[in-house]
Image: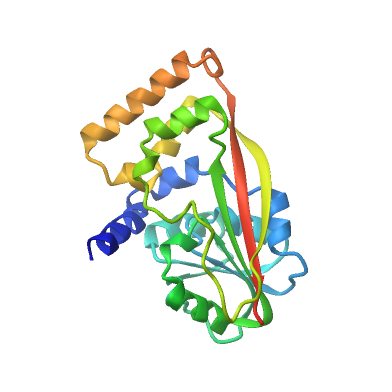
Amino acid sequence: MRERNEHDLHAHSFDQAADVYEAARPAYPAEAVSWLLEGVTGRVLDLGAGTGKLTRSLVERGYEVSAVDPSSSMLRVLQDALPGVDAHLGSGERIPLPDDSVDAIVCGQAWHWVDPAVAVPEAARVLRPGGTLGLVWNFRDESVDWVRQLGELMQTEQAYVGDDVEPVVGSPFGELERHETRWAQPMTLDGLLDLARSRSYFITKDAETQAAVIESLRRLAAEHPDLAGKTVFELPYVTESFRARLS
């Protein structure tokens, strides 16, 4: 029960930081989105859509899009940016769409929040036969020294466990395929601080701990040789994408 309460605390923390999340979190690289949706036409559901980071890519590609998220605050930001998108409150366990209504489901940075025992059959319910389930995560590339130090200072070891392991899907979906994309996001110090502020393991800390983290990141930017004196630098990412077809 304690683990589940911790899960729920982190999962619902984004209500407090929707605007910071939108400002700080990266979008998804075009290569990854194209791979997720290879061969897909028709309607796409963005599940756990948040503020619409992935939704924008779907709209730009000309898909009919529905967006579902459990946070009204996150959906508010999404609808302000994408007023034409069909948006609903819901979750991976309760998708408010009819049976056989979408050709693909994509889920960015969110599948680790769901209970796959419930979410997998629920995804299969709303997908049309042969539909695609695509899951994607952006990870900072901590093989780079300053990025590794960034993770240590942001106390990422206290993150909710689950976003760093291969996702669970299984029957009635077929084999889970995997694709990796390496890229970099231009970043400023203010953007880096907002990135920390947008993380669930930061949001759930007390004000004193939050202030200490922010101060440590300022020192990193001022003192690390890869960052010192730069107003704009590149934050390297590895994007991990997974897809499976409904059998």
In the rendered view, would you say 27 is above or below 92?
above
In the image, 66 versus 117, the foreground residue is: 117
231 displayed left or right of 16: right
Residue 136, position as x, y percentages in the image: 58, 56
Question: Residue at left 56%, top 87%?
Answer: 99
**Quadrant of the rendered image containing residue 169:** bottom right
Whether residue 135 is visible here, answered yes or no, is: yes
In the rendered view, would you say 126 is above or below 203?
below
46 displayed left or right of 130: left
134 displayed left or right of 11: right
In the rendered view, would you say 195 is above or below 105?
above
**Quadrant of the rendered image containing residue 220:** top left
Question: Residue at left 44%, top 34%?
Answer: 151
Residue 203, position as x, y percentages in the image: 31, 44
Residue 122, position as x, y percentages in the image: 50, 80
Q: Quadrant of the C terminus?
A: bottom right
Picture colour scheme: rainbow
Question: Residue at left 65%, top 79%?
Answer: 246
Question: Residue at left 35%, top 24%?
Answer: 216
Task: Give the mark count.
Answer: 0
In the rendered view, would you say 237 is above or below 57?
above
Q: Residue furthest right?
A: 39
**Quadrant of the rendered image containing residue 58:** bottom right
In the image, 246 versus 67, the foreground residue is: 246
Residue 201, position as x, y percentages in the image: 34, 45
Whether residue 190 is visible here, answered yes or no, is: no
